[in-house]
Image (cartoon, rainbow, N blue to C red):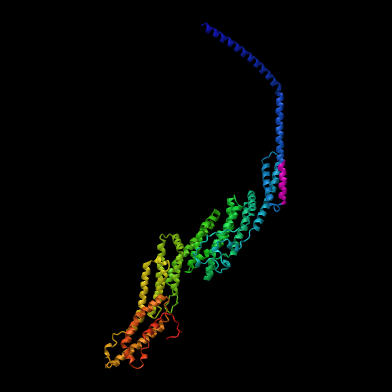
């Protein structure tokens, strides 16, 4: 307990000493605080003066800096004014910089309206800017006009793929150097690459772009549009005219000779490719570069620059599509339809803006009209074949011009199979294969019907059969060698081959039945002659045999003279027909001579009746169907 009391006393003593120290520190700190307060009170006026001086210096610095900026703007204004007064011709880029500087100055002073001189400066700068924009407008006009020249045809031809370049001359001259429909679908392994021409030098385009930008900023959209339209529209039209493009009407087309019109259509197809893939494509690139960032103005300028040129091109297509239909126009109509389909994706892209809607619509309408006219012409052809009333008569019974024309027409149609199928689809035909097969079959039927009518012009029924045989054989042979076989089918071919044979058989029956009757053993009095010829009926029987020989000679010579002028143009068919006649005639003649020849040979002038031996007949049969002229010497 004593120990605890001692420890408690020590703790109390320590706490009393700590309190004493704390009281002393509080007293010291309080005295220090009073002295600091007094010192602060004494220094406050000095601090206030120092702060005021610092703020004054800051305001002076700010004012000086503002003044410097204002003075700098005045200096820049004088410099810009000097450049603008000199005009844009000496240094266009520097002039454009000065215009930009003027706009910056106007913006600066417009934001500092408290300055008494700001209104005057802004007005002066605005007046100067207005004058500079007018000068820029004139500069733009002169620069664009000086570099807007019609494109020479040779330059455009050089931009074409090698396979499409004219070999000699120019398509514009109508010399056939343009693409012809007879060259349809000739393919090349060489890639088809077009290289649009450079219409304006690349170094000029940035200047035109900068000028256009300043004019747009100056609110001269309409003036810019007018300048571009005037310059570039003229260039497009003149380039096409140099190429050979004409604005023609339906009446103009109707008056043309077919050869002239065909050449112009071939050239027009060439021109369409050149215009869309080269000329209009290049013009689009120019507008894209000059008016970059101003889409509406760009599209308007391009539309205005090209609309008239497109109209020139399409007018010819419209004139052809609306002109009187005729069979020979079908293939060029299909060529024209093909080029419109080929170019449609590019037309839709190049003329894709809302301002080119009329161009796209006109192109689509022309394509549709060409398809319609082609389809109607195809249907007309069937009727024209059936009703063909040409007075041309082939005297020798050979293949009629109508037959070769129709067959070549049909064969040529199959070069356009893909195009015809697209055309049928355009008018809602689902089974295009069946449609094409049906039309082809009907054309063949129309041809056969017409040939049947023409065959009746012959007075000799044997020549009628020869004519039908020749023409049907030509049809069958041509179909078998073409894609039409797949469309018409093997059954059709076999049926027509039987028809050919039927006509050949009819020819043999009509031509040779009468002469073969002369050589018939039956009824010739074969049983009237004894071994020595002394039968009492021998005179009558010999007379009858003489008559038979005389009749045979007369008939055969007549057939030889007439039928050697007839023609079987196909060598295989000709030999086959001769052999078929010989296989019947020669054995009958040999048999007749062997049986009754001695009766004549033992009498007077046997050569008068037995003029020919079998070898003579065989040699003369080889002269049948050779198409000899009437003036040829006869045997």
Q: Residue at x 60, y 60 (%)?
A: 236
Q: Residue at x 38, y 77 (%)?
A: 577
Taking 518 as reference, is 471 above or below it? Answer: above
- Res. 110 image quadrant: top right
Q: Where is residue 417 shown, x and y percent of the image?
A: 45, 63
Q: Where is residue 343 shown, x and y percent of the image?
A: 52, 59
Taking 98 as reference, is 407 above or below it? Answer: below
Q: Where is residue 266 shown, x and y percent of the image?
A: 53, 66
Q: Where is residue 57 shown, x and y percent of the image?
A: 72, 32
Total residue callouts: 0
- Res. 395 image quadrant: bottom left
Residue 404 lies in magenta, yes or no?
A: no
Q: Image check: 173 left or right of 550?
A: right
| Magenta region | 71-86
Residue 85 lies in magenta, yes or no?
A: yes
Q: Image check: 196 left or right of 547?
A: right
């Amino acid at each position: 307990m004593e120990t605890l009391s001692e420890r408690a006393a020590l703790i109390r003593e320590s706490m009393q000493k700590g309190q004493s120290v704390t009281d002393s520190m509080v007293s010291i700190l309080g005295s220090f605080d009073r002295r600091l307060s007094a010192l602060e009170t004494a220094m406050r006026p000095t601090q206030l003066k120092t702060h005021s001086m610092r703020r004054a210096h800051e305001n002076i610095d700010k004012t000086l800096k503002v003044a410097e900026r204002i003075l700098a703007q005045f200096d820049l204004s004088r410099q810009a004014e000097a450049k603008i007064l000199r005009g844009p011709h000496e240094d266009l880029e520097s002039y454009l910089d000065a215009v930009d500087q003027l706009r910056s100055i106007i913006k600066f002073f417009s934001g500092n309206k408290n300055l008494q001189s700001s209104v005057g400066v802004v007005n002066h700068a605005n007046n100067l800017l207005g004058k500079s924009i007018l000068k820029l407008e004139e500069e733009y006009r002169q620069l664009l006009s000086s570099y807007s020249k019609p494109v020479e045809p040779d330059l455009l031809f050089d931009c074409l793929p090698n396979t499409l370049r004219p070999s000699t001359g120019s398509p514009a001259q109508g010399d056939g150097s343009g693409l012809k429909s007879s060259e349809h679908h000739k393919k090349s392994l060489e890639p088809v690459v077009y290289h649009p021409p450079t219409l304006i030098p690349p170094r000029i385009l940035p200047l035109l772009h900068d000028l256009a930008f300043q004019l747009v900023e100056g609110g001269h959209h309409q003036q810019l549009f007018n300048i571009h339209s005037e310059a570039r529209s003229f260039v497009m039209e003149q380039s096409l005219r140099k190429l050979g493009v004409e604005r023609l009407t339906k009446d103009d087309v109707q008056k043309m000779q077919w050869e002239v019109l065909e050449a112009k259509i071939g050239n027009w197809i060439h021109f369409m490719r050149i215009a869309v893939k080269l000329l209009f494509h290049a013009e689009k690139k120019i507008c894209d570069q000059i008016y970059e960032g101003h889409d509406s103005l760009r599209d308007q300028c391009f539309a205005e620059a090209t609309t008239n040129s497109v109209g020139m091109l399409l007018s010819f297509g419209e004139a052809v599509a609306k002109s009187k239909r005729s069979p020979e126009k079908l293939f060029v109509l299909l060529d024209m339809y093909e080029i419109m389909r080929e170019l449609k994706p590019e037309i839709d892209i190049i003329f894709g803006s809302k301002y080119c809607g009329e161009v796209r619509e006109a192109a689509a309408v022309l394509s549709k009209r060409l398809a319609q006219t082609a389809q109607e012409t195809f249907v007309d052809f069937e009727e024209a074949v059936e009703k063909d009333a040409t007075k041309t008569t082939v005297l020798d019974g050979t293949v009629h011009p109508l037959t070769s024309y129709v067959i070549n027409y049909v064969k040529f149609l199959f070069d356009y199979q893909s195009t015809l199928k697209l055309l049928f689809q355009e008018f809602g035909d689902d089974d295009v294969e069946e449609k094409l097969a049906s039309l082809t079959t009907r054309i063949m039927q129309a041809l056969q019907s017409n040939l049947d009518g023409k065959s009746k012009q012959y007075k000799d029924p044997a020549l009628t059969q020869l004519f039908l045989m020749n023409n049907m054989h030509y049809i069958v042979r041509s179909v078998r060698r073409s894609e039409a076989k797949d469309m018409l089918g093997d059954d059709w071919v076999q049926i027509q081959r039987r028809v050919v044979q039927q006509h050949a058989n009819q020819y043999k029956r009509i031509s040779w039945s009468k002469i073969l009757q002369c050589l018939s053993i039956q009824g010739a009095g074969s049983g009237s002659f004894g071994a020595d010829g002394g039968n009492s009926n021998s005179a009558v029987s010999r007379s009858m045999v003489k008559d038979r020989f005389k009749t045979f000679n007369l008939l055969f010579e007549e057939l030889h003279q007439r039928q050697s002028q007839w023609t079987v143009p196909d060598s295989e068919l000709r030999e086959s027909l001769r052999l078929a006649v010989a296989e019947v005639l020669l054995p009958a003649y040999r048999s007749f001579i062997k049986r009754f020849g001695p009766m004549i040979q033992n009498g007077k002038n046997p050569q008068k009746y037995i003029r020919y031996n079998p070898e003579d007949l065989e040699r003369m049969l080889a002269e049948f169907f050779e198409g000899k002229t009437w003036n040829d010497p006869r045997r």
